[in-house]
Amino acid sequence: MSFLGLSFLFSDRTRGLLLCVVLPMLLAGCMSDLADPDLAHRELAIYDRVDLMPFFAMIPEKPFTETQQASLKEKYSEHWFRPWGKSLVVPDKSQPSWGISYISETVLYRENKRSVDALFLKKITAEMNLDAFPNADTLAVSVRYTHLKYIPDHGSLFETPDDFPFDVLQVTSVGPGTPLRIWHVSRDGLWVYVSAPFASGWVSVLDIATMTAKDTAWVMSLPMYAVMKDSVVAVSLETQRPVLDLSLGQHYPGVMGQRSQVYVPIRQSGGQARWSVVAVEDAMALQPFGVTWSRQLVAQLAMGVMGEPYGWGGLFFHRDCSALMRDFLAPFGIWLPRNSAAQAKYGGRYESLSMMTNEEKTRAIVGKGRPFLTLLWLKGHVMLYVGSPQGEPMALHNIWGVRVRDRLGQSQKVIIGRTVITDLEPGKSLPGFDLTQSLLSRIEGMTFLGE
């Protein structure tokens, strides 16, 4: 392993002296091109191995009053249970048909790097049966981790043969216990088009179960418990066997008087939902939903998400930038929509930075941003401002990578591919880095959460 790969083991002074000697030699060996992605990656300034305590010290201790916290929780619950409400309207037919329309008009490639053919389009169009849309109106709930898709198909499609992981069929992932509304059933009965609290799409019928109005009323009457970290093993009280692993950002109806027990839905043979009691060993992994914001809890959540692999649209059930924001803030009752643009617009009070220079943006973010309560948004990406320990704004985000140019001017991607804390110009130390394309240069605004 190189010095840079181990640099986090040295003191600041020792690391600085070694960088003066070693870094020029490393740079000299890679200035000609960036053919070695690992070398480029090692030079990328990322902060998932440093002491995070300076950031945690900047977390506001009590940013919300009890009244504000209660209002946030109520607003979140309204969004979450909306698919089960009477006010939800039938989606326009253009929504379930958008995916097939886009595929028909665009050259896309399947997992085998072959372009989509007419036979595939014909098959999917027939299965969607959109001439009969909508042919259902049924309450439902997800029973396992699953994906919402733009078309009823388990595969992936990419805009170029090498465009992984950006699957254009992926809407988002949903966890178990998510309220759903079924609007349409495919011709073969294996797929349904649903509305979830934060998105709509096609989902496998085997991943959901139907509910009655009585069922939904019962669930909504129970206290909700938020999951405070990933990979929380839930054990069935009936079988005494693990049945599910719970994840940060999810919440489940709780068993009265039992802090470590919640209900999870199970699909019965006829397709109806049955709610079963599960228990978790770590009682602190569950907190009453809308938990009071505290420095300790925010720090705990931040430590837990660091290093998580990037998952475009929830691919492989990992988080992308906007899913990270949603799940990180959900336990506190802070509701965010699904995509980054909607989060910036509807997550709180929005302030535009689009007409500012980089220096002006930096001053605005440092001067006005509230650590861990301010979103920084640019087209296609969103970050959580975490403070400026040394006067330079830093952000928590899950990012795929940054672009640089080689000596021939060709664009290349340096992959980060995980949740990190970085400055707003990650990769600026790389040869060929284009400052005009840095995150800071492209930031268009910031959103003050809860305002």
Image (cartoon, rainbow, N blue to C red):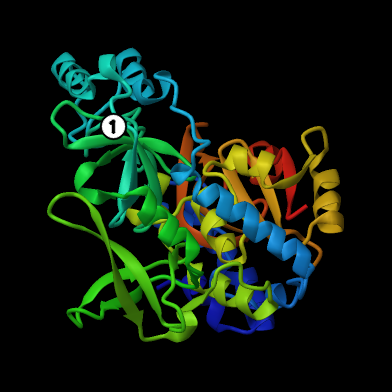
Quadrant location, the N terminus: bottom left
Which quarter of the picture shows residue 195? top left
Question: Local crowd at mark 1 within 10 Å, few (<14), some, or many (≥20)?
Answer: many
Residue 265, x across and y down, in percent? 30, 61
Q: Is residue 61 left or right of residue 25?
A: right
Residue nearer the viewer, 366 or 38: 366
Q: Is residue 59 in view from this perspective?
A: yes
Residue 230, x across and y down, in percent? 41, 70
Which quarter of the picture shows residue 297? bottom right
Q: Is residue 102 left or right of residue 428?
A: left
- Which residue is depicted at the point 70% across and 41% down? 443
Residue located farthest toward the front when viewing the structure as drawn:
214
Residue nearer the viewer, 380 or 4: 380
299 vs 140: above or below: below
Which residue does the numbered mark 1 point to in the structure image?
A: 157
The amino acid pointed to by label 1 is: Leu
Q: Circle 1 sits in a helix, a strand or a loop, which is it?
A: loop
Count of labels in the image: 1
Residue nearer the viewer, 29 or 422: 422
106 vs 219: above or below: above
- Which residue is depicted at the point 52% across and 31% down? 409
311 vs 108: above or below: below
Residue 244, x across and y down, in percent? 28, 69
- Which residue is depicted at the point 45% across and 43% down? 83
Q: Is residue 301 left or right of residue 90?
A: right
Q: Is residue 163 in view from this perspective?
A: no
- Which residue is depicted at the point 28% across and 56% down? 143
Q: Is residue 157 left or right of residue 28?
A: left
Residue 140, x across and y down, in percent? 33, 47
